[in-house]
Image: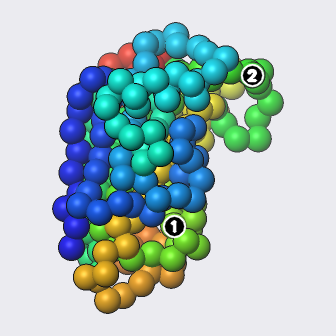
Amino acid sequence: MSDIRHTVTGGALIVTADRPFHTVSSSLFGGGCQQKKYLVNAQVPHGYSSADPWRDLEQRVHDLGLPIDETAGMMTAADVDQVVEGVAFGDQYCLHTYVTAGVGNAARAGVRRKTYPGYIAGTINIIVAIDGRLTEAALINAVITITEAKTAALQDSGIVIRDGSGRTATGTTTDAVIVAATQSPQYQGIHQYAGLATELGGSIADSVYHSLSQCLASAKGGQRQ
């Protein structure tokens, strides 16, 4: 078993475990399928816009004293001190969910909108760290499950896009997700799926849904974050 923990320091949420994670992520810095020891969600000011956000994140990681090659990082304008953590246990796994949410640029997939060449802050960032063993396909399956749970939470919370149509949002224009597994050999079972039909997928969806719903309910003036 590997102890998963988090700290908030220097305006950043940092998630670690007793062993490196195998990660699948859409994070700007250190994204893709990689081995990472540190998972970072770094806070930026409201109104942040940059032509080179990757370089900005690299500097933040450096300032935090973390090794560049061992870190996956993303940005948010939401207050990382208000991160909502969810924990779930099941057969052959324990998972921790960390959610921060700003919905100032809420959007609905399939609806035409103005696009931007640079990074605009105002995002839903989700980290799901799993103490357990997953195939790479299961990690990717977990990204789908997380996205479905995120959309369900947004719709049930009544978050609408700002085009006056009253249509509910499916996300924001800059959402990011990290799924990370310790791959601890102390677990005998290897999860090959993480969809809603599985115990693991159900736990992921439930944890993400309730954590994000709590973020949205507690965020004051969340539409501008």
User: Left of 81 or right of it: where is 145?
Assistant: right
Tell me if I can see residue 206 in this picture.
Answer: no
Residue located at (56% from left, 47% from top): 31
Residue 190 horizontal/vertical position (percent) = 42, 84
Residue located at (52% from left, 10% from top): 47
Camera-side residue of 35 and 207? 35
**Which residue corresponds to mark 1?**
139
Quadrant where the image shows the N terminus: bottom left
Residue located at (23% from left, 28% from top): 9
Residue located at (63% from left, 21% from top): 52
Camera-side residue of 141 and 132? 132
For mark 2, does the 10 Å Cα neighbourhood hold few (<14), some (14 to 19), or many (20 or more) residues?
few
Tell me if I can see residue 46 in this picture.
Answer: yes
Residue 168 horizontal/vertical position (percent) = 59, 36
Looking at the rendered structure, the secondary structure element under dot 2 is loop
If you read the primary sequence from the N terminus, does the residue marked by circle 2 or circle 1 appear first?
Answer: 2
Query: What amino acid is at disc 1?
Result: Leu
User: Left of 119 or right of it: where is 71?
Assistant: left
Residue 219 horizontal/vertical position (percent) = 33, 25
Is the residue 144 above or below the residue 115 in the image? below
Query: What amino acid is at disc 2?
Result: Pro
Occupied quadrant, residue 54 = top right
Is the residue 20 above or below the residue 62 in the image? below
Q: Could you tell me if the residues under marks 2 and 1 are in contact, i.e. CB atoms within 8 Å?
A: no
**Which residue corresponds to mark 2?**
117
Camera-side residue of 132 and 70? 70
| Disc 2/disc 1 C-alpha distance (Å) | 29 Å
For mark 1, does the 10 Å Cα neighbourhood hold few (<14), some (14 to 19), or many (20 or more) residues?
many
